[in-house]
Image (spheres, rainbow, N blue to C red):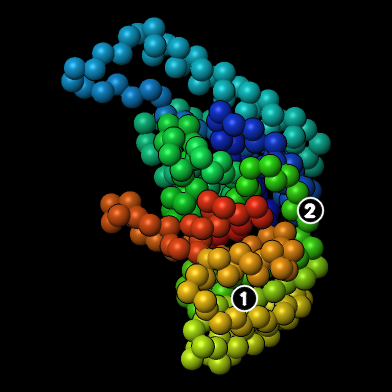
C-alpha cells in the first residue's frame, strides 16, 4: 500500500530543515497528503520546597508559543507547493510526548521525524524520544539524522531477523523498496545458523520479486558486534536508507531499545525506517 498520508513531526528548539525537505520529496513522490505536528510539555511545577515564579511560567509559555509559531512557518513554507491536502497541528500537553504523537498518527501511513543525538533522547519537554515513538506508534517511523536532507533511495539495506518486528518493517518499507535502485537483504547469524539465514533470505527475495523489487541476499557471519557489522555493510553498500525492526520493552520494564536499532538511532548517518 502506498503512503497516502504522511505525518511530519517537527522537533522544537532545533532545525527541522532535513525532515521537511525529505518529507516534501516523499509527499510529491507518492502524491500524499501531509499533516505537520509540533508538541511539547509546559514547565513542570514541582510540589514541595521548590518555588517557580509566575514570571518564569509566563516566559516558558511565550517561548513555547514562539517555538511552535516558528515550526508552523517552516512547515507551511516547505509544503506551499504540495498538491495534496496540508494540515497543521500543535499541542502543549502534560501527557508523555511519544504517546501523544503516536495517538495523532492514527490516520497516517508514515511518520517522518528527526533526531539530535545529544538532545532528543533526554529533553522530554520538547524532544520526542524516537525510540518510544517507534514502539508505540503502530506505524513505520522514518528517522532523519541531523544534517541529512536527502533520501535518494539509490541503495537500501534491510536488516533482517526472522521476527515479527522485521516482517512488519520490510512490509511497511515496500513502497520505498519499489522505488529503490538496489536493495540488499542482510541477515547476520552465527556460523551454524548461516544455512537457515540463506533460506530466510531466499524466501524474502522471492516475495519481494512479486512486488516488483529485485533484491540481493547477503548472509553474514556474526563477529559478536552485530550493530557494528550491519553498519559496516551499510557503508560498504553506500546505503541511503536502512530498514530495521524496532525491538524493546516499555519504560516501566527498564525499556531498552534493542542493540542494533539503538546503535543506529544514536550513530547512523543514513535515514532509518523502523517498525515495531
| Residue at x 58% of width, y 90% of height | 199
How far apart marks 1 and 2 lie (CA) works out to 27 Å
Q: Is residue 96 left or right of residue 46?
A: right
| Residue at x 67% of width, y 81% of height | 217
How crowded pointer 1 is (Cα within 10 Å; few <14, some 14-19, many 20+) is rated as many
Q: Is residue 248 left or right of residue 146?
A: left
Q: Is residue 265 left or right of residue 70?
A: left
The residue that mark 1 highlights is 186
| Residue at x 64% of width, y 42% of height | 146
Res 124 label:
none
Residue 240 visible at all: yes
Q: Secondary structure at mark 1?
A: strand
Q: Quadrant of residue 100?
A: top left
Q: How many marks?
A: 2
- Quadrant in which the N terminus appears: bottom right
> Residue 140, position in %: x, y?
57, 57
Residue 140 visible at all: no
> Residue 131, position in %: x, y?
47, 51
Query: Nearest the camera: 225 or 125?
Result: 225
Whether 240 is drawn above or below 76: the answer is below
Query: Nearest the camera: 200 or 239?
Result: 239
> Residue 14, position in %: x, y?
59, 31
Whether 168 is drawn above or below 200: the answer is above
Whether 110 is drawn above or below 90: the answer is below
The extreme top residue here reads 55
How crowded pointer 2 is (Cα within 10 Å; few <14, some 14-19, many 20+) is rated as few
Question: Is there a contact, CB below 8 Å, between mark 1 and mark 2?
Answer: no
- The answer to which of marks 1 and 2 sits earlier in the sequence is 2
| Residue at x 70% of width, y 36% of height | 17
The residue that mark 2 highlights is 29
The extreme left residue here reads 48
Whether 50 is drawn above or below 260: the answer is above
Amino acid at each position: 500500500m502506498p503512503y497516502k498520508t504522511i505525518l511530519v513531526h517537527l522537533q522544537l528548539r532545533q532545525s527541522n530543515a532535513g525532515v521537511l525537505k525529505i518529507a516534501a520529496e516523499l509527499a510529491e513522490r507518492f502524491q500524499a497528503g501531509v499533516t505537520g505536528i509540533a508538541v511539547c510539555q509546559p514547565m513542570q511545577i514541582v510540589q514541595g520546597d521548590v518555588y517557580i515564579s509566575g514570571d518564569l511560567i509566563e516566559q516558558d509559555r511565550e517561548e513555547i508559543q514562539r517555538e511552535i509559531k516558528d515550526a508552523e512557518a517552516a512547515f507551511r513554507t516547505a509544503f506551499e507547493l504540495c498538491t495534496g491536502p496540508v494540515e497543521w497541528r500543535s499541542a502543549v500537553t502534560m501527557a508523555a510526548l511519544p504517546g501523544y504523537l503516536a495517538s495523532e498518527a492514527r490516520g497516517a501511513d508514515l511518520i517522518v521525524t528527526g533526531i539530535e543525538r545529544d538532545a532528543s533522547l533526554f529533553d522530554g519537554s520538547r524532544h520526542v524520544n524516537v525510540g518510544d515513538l517507534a514502539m508505540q506508534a503502530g506505524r513505520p517511523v522514518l528517522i532523519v539524522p541531523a544534517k541529512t536532507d536527502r533520501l535518494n533511495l539509490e541503495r537500501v539495506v534491510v536488516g533482517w531477523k526472522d521476527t515479527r518486528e522485521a516482517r512488519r518493517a520490510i512490509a511497511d518499507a515496500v513502497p520505498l523498496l519499489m522505488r529503490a535502485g538496489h536493495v540488499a537483504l542482510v541477515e547476520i547469524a552465527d556460523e551454524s545458523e548461516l544455512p537457515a539465514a540463506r533460506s530466510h533470505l531466499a524466501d524474502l527475495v522471492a516475495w519481494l520479486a512479486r512486488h516488483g523489487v529485485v533484491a540481493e541476499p547477503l548472509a553474514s557471519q556474526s563477529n559478536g558486534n552485530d550493530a557494528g557489522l550491519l553498519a559496516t555493510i551499510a557503508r560498504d553498500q553506500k546505503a541511503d536508507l536502512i530498514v530495521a525492526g524496532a525491538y524493546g520493552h516499555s519504560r516501566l520494564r527498564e525499556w531498552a531499545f534493542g542493540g542494533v536499532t539503538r546503535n543506529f538511532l544514536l550513530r547512523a548517518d543514513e535515514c532509518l525506517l523502523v517498525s515495531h
